[in-house]
Image: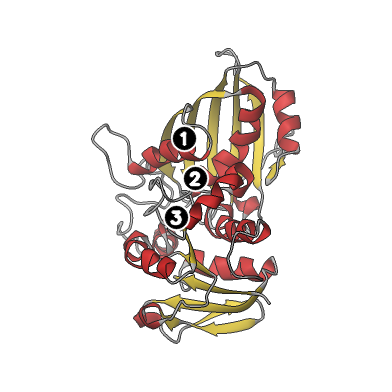
């Protein structure tokens, strides 16, 4: 007997990707339900070679459903996740709503799978921010080897991280510059086409944006509260795929060659690091892949026990949909559900 899975926010970028990944990975589901708001009721979405009609979240009965993969935003999750969890269904939430709740585990399976047992407190598991997820997958094996003291990261985040409207805005502005007439910013604060914007999420009192704050807090919760992290998060005119330039200070000595060897053996990581033109991975090459790619691994000559490297991943996959499905797989593999499969 397989599982019953509901995908909430099934018409969005991440919801559609969740359905794709459930099918690709042959998730052991007997039934999959596509849920969305009332205005999307009846809209069809793809699930493998099938088409699913979206049902209304407000009228759906979650009794007997094993997993609710939630990608409908913080406001919807705040209202609905506790209600769904109370019906015995495990919610795996992709929004920021539950990430900082001490009773909700924040999980990247390659990094802290053991913490998933904490879901039983509220029947909710949180998925981290997309930029955090790919970062900690790479940091974890290096931290185990040489203990990380401090991380400095600059992100180059694609517009898909801000939703379909953001992707449309990049397309419309690019097309407008060349063919029609330039359009002004709507989703973003400034023109995104042929530009970069050092501003993701709201500004905080200390000058950080909330996206930068999230990376620090989530890395501490997932990996180690002693790690110091500072981030500068930048939106770039790329449709899919987040990149990160990372500098790490370690407690113990570690060479670039040692790091390369460690990362080649790390789960979820692929090293592409040839010191020649094109011997690295860029966002366009990672689209549709599960892996987090690492390139440009080198020693920092200005710092004792320092390394710098470049990380690229499909943010709709590892940064969101894939990680969500992997969490459900972890719960199943560890036999943590009351229901028998």
Q: Secondary structure at mark 3?
A: helix
Give residue 233's quadrant in the image: top left
Specify the farthest residue to the front: 338
Q: Quadrant of the N terminus?
A: bottom right
Q: What is the C-alpha distance between the residues marked 1 and 3?
A: 21 Å
Label 3: how many Cα within 10 Å (few below 14, some 14–19, many 20+): few
Label 2: how many Cα within 10 Å (few below 14, some 14–19, many 20+): many
Residue at 35 percent of width and 79 percent of height: 58
Instruction: Specify the label residue 121 is tagged with.
Output: 3
Residue at the spot of label 2:
131
**Residue 123, how many percent across, how many down?**
46, 60
- Foreground mark, 3 or 2, reads 3
**Residue 325, how many percent across, how many down?**
59, 61
**Residue 14, how many percent across, how many down?**
50, 64
**Front residue of 210 and 187:** 210
Ranked by sequence position, the earlier of labels 3 and 2 is: 3
Residue at the spot of label 1:
220
Q: What is the C-alpha distance between the residues marked 2 and 1?
A: 14 Å
Do residues under tags 3 and 2 come within 8 Å of each other at their CB atoms? no
Note whether 110 is above or below 308 in the view shown: below
Q: What is the C-alpha distance between the residues marked 3 and 2?
A: 27 Å
Note whether 250 is above or below 162 in the view shown: above
Ranked by sequence position, the earlier of labels 1 and 3 is: 3
**Residue 83, how many percent across, how many down?**
37, 69
Ranked by sequence position, the earlier of labels 2 and 1 is: 2
Residue at 53 percent of width and 46 percent of height: 133
Note whether 188 is above or below 151 in the view shown: below
């Amino acid at each position: 007997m397989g599982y019953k899975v509901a995908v909430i926010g099934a018409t969005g970028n991440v919801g559609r990707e969740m359905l794709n990944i459930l099918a690709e990975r042959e998730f052991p589901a007997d039934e999959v339900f596509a849920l969305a708001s009332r205005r999307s009721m009846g809209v069809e979405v793809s699930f493998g070679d099938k088409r699913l009609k979206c049902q209304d979240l407000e009228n759906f009965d979650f009794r007997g459903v094993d997993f609710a993969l939630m990608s409908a935003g913080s406001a919807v999750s705040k209202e609905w996740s506790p209600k769904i969890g109370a019906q015995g269904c495990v919610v795996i939430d992709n929004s920021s709503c539950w990430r900082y709740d001490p009773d909700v585990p924040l999980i990247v399976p390659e990094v802290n799978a053991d913490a998933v047992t904490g879901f039983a407190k509220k029947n909710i598991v949180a998925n981290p921010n997309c930029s955090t997820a790919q970062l900690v997958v790479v940091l974890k094996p290096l931290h185990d080897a040489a203990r990380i003291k401090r991380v400095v990261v600059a992100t180059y985040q694609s517009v898909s991280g801000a939703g379909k409207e953001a992707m449309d805005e990049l397309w419309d502005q690019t097309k407008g510059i060349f063919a029609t007439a330039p359009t002004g910013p709507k989703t973003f604060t400034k023109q995104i086409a042929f530009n970069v914007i050092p501003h993701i999420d709201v500004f905080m009192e200390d000058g950080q944006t909330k996206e930068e704050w999230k990376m620090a807090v989530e890395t501490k919760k997932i990996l180690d509260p002693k790690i110091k992290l500072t981030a500068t998060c930048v939106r770039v005119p790329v449709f899919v795929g987040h990149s990160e330039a990372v500098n790490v200070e370690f407690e113990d000595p570690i060479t670039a060659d040692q790091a390369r060897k460690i990362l080649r053996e790390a789960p979820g990581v692929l090293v592409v690091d040839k010191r020649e033109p094109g011997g690295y991975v860029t966002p366009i090459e990672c689209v549709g892949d599960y892996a987090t790619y690492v390139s440009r691994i080198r020693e920092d000559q200005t710092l004792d026990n320092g390394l710098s490297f470049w990380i690229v991943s499909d943010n709709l996959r590892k940064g969101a949909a894939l990680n969500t499905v992997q969490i459900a797989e972890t719960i199943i593999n560890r036999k943590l559900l009351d229901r028998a499969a």
